[in-house]
Amino acid sequence: MKRLGLVALSCVVLLASASYAAAQVAGSTRVGITVEETRAVAVGWSAKKQILRQPVYNEQNQKVGTIDDLIIAPDTSVSFVIVGAGGFVGVGKHDVAIPVNQLKQQDGKFVLSGATKEAIKALPKFEYSKK
């Protein structure tokens, strides 16, 4: 009886793995990434771990905001960072869109030259599309 259960379990595992492999292909287009792309991913940045929720400083090392989001353009490039300034526990926070090319990384910190909390709060507030 145990042997029959083991054979049945083996069949389920084989069928599940076969259907998983089939799920990797949508029509004739391969879904996923190549070995070369996997290597690029391995040395790339993780938005969740290395960018989002990171503080933004000015060149005087004063914290002026926090990176809350990344905006990806239709051509798949990162075009803007959404920086939140002010507020306490999300209340009164002012989100603004900053072109990604204005943000520099220096000594492991994200630096926005010439920025102050007041300057960021003076920028037009960023609001997500309602769509």
Image (cartoon, rainbow, N blue to C red):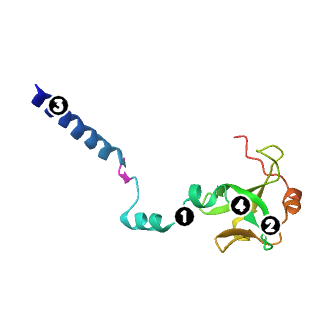
The spot of residue 69 in percent (x, y) is 67, 54
The spot of residue 13 in percent (x, y) is 24, 38
Image mark for residue 62: 2
Q: Residue placed at 76% from the left, 44% from the top?
A: 89
Does the magenta segment cover residue 27?
yes
Secondary-structure class at tag 3: helix
Q: Mark 2 or mark 1: name the one nearer the start of the chain.
A: 1
Please name the predominant secondary structure of the magenta segment in the image. strand
Quadrant of the image containing the N terminus: top left
Could you give the CA–CA distance between mark 1 and mark 4, rounded to whole angstroms?
16 Å
Could you give the CA–CA distance between mark 3 and mark 4, rounded to whole angstroms?
54 Å
Quadrant of the image containing the C terminus: top right
Q: Residue placed at 39% from the left, 68% from the top?
A: 36
Please say if 54 is above or below 103. above
Q: Mark 2 or mark 3: name the one nearer the start of the chain.
A: 3
- Mark 3 packing: few (<14 Cα in 10 Å), some, or many (20+)? few
Where is mark 4, residue-wise? 55
Please say if 109 is above or below 117. below
Q: Amino acid at mark 4?
A: Pro
Callout 2 touching callout 3 (CB < 8 Å): no
- Mark 1 packing: few (<14 Cα in 10 Å), some, or many (20+)? few
Where is mark 1, residue-wise? 45
- Could you tell whether 8 is left or right of 42 in the image? left
Asked whether 1 or 96 is in front, the reply is 1
